[in-house]
Image (cartoon, rainbow, N blue to C red):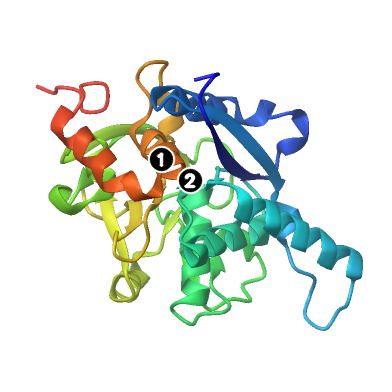
Amino acid sequence: AEEGHEVVIAFVGKYNKGGGDAYQSVIAALHHAAVAIQRKLKIEWIDATDLERPPAGTDDPEVAERVMQAEARLRSAHGIFVPGGFGDRGIEGKARAAGLAREWRKPYFGVCLGMQVAIIQFARDVLGLPDATSEEFDKDKRSKNHVIMYMPEISKETMGANMRLGARWVEFNDPANSLGAGLYGGADRIMERHRHRYEFNVAYKARFEAKGIVFSGQDEKKERMDVIELRSTDHPFYLAVQFHPEYKSRPGMPSPPFYGFVAAAANPEGVAETTAVCRRKGPMAHWTPFEL
């Protein structure tokens, strides 16, 4: 892989200044995937705040130049990745990255918050809801469209012991036609690790589906949306997950969505073949453990 061609991933984060220390699991998962396709991984670090435009009506040449340069770096990468995170700093930049990836038809993969910002930007751009946001970022309740909401069964008064944590089943409702399911070998359900307290507001589900978002993976009760994707006719590779697949990625056994994403970044025209190969190999017990 060190001698192979580079695959450049734009990493749109908010904890970039430590040299990637905050994202070690994700970086490892990207490396596992790059090695598997015999490519050398190059991460293009992009601070999410650098993609944030100045407020309407203001004219700041320095900010405009910063945004322009960040957009150019984003566009020049082979794929765009948005990781998880907490708090509202950099959120608008992450959301813009997800929207630009969709607009440019550039391979996109979002994890946890990376899925949520993809939903937020889609609601703004496609559903015509300019105030769409997450309840997490709207403490003053100015928005009428919380497309991401606090999980209803969890207390809002405490920050401790109130997350959806650990390994949980994710079920694909149409595995034969799902990009995500295909990367997991055509599995109809997988077990992945979660770590979040906000989720998609299912009151908006029908509106998103009518405009092309596919909620391909859900929890066992079909109440929580865990995987979203765009159809191949709409985008070569647009996938986001609420869980954290990086936690189960291993050398020689890359996380399926990370593998699919990096392969798509290296060869967008080869997504169908990559997915077909994964299907022929079938599900792996690492992600579909046997239960009595």
Q: Nearer the viewer, residue 163 or 253?
A: 253
Q: Secondary structure at mark 2?
A: loop
How would you rate the neighbour count of disc 2 (Cα within 10 Å): few for under 14, some for 14-19, many for 20 or more?
Answer: many
Q: Nearer the viewer, residue 10 or 49?
A: 10
**Which residue is drawn at the image coordinates 13% and 23% (left, top)?**
291
- Residue 153, given in percent of the width and then of the height, sits at 40, 51
User: Disc 2 or 1, which lies upstream in sequence?
Assistant: 2
How would you rate the neighbour count of disc 1 (Cα within 10 Å): few for under 14, some for 14-19, many for 20 or more?
Answer: many
**Which residue is drawn at the image coordinates 63% and 76% (left, top)?**
142
Height in image: 134 above or below 20?
Answer: below
Q: Which residue is mark 2?
A: 112
Height in image: 165 above or below 225?
Answer: above
**Residue 164 visible in rendering:** no
**Which residue is drawn at the image coordinates 66% and 40% (left, top)?**
44
**Which residue is drawn at the image coordinates 79% and 75% (left, top)?**
55
Q: Nearer the viewer, residue 259 or 147?
A: 259
- Residue 64, given in percent of the width and then of the height, sits at 82, 67
- Residue 125, given in percent of the width and then of the height, sits at 51, 75
- Residue 8, given in percent of the width and then of the height, sits at 57, 39
Q: Secondary structure at mark 1?
A: loop
Q: Is residue 93 left or right of residue 192?
A: right
Q: Nearer the viewer, residue 79 or 242?
A: 79
Measure the C-alpha gap from mark 2 to mark 1.
6 Å
Q: Which residue is mark 1?
A: 243
Q: Is residue 41 left or right of residue 252?
A: right
Q: Are marks 2 and 1 in contact (CB under 8 Å)?
A: yes
Name the residue type under label 2.
Answer: Cys
Q: Quadrant of residue 65?
A: bottom right
**Which residue is farthest top?**
251
Height in image: 3 above or below 209?
Answer: above
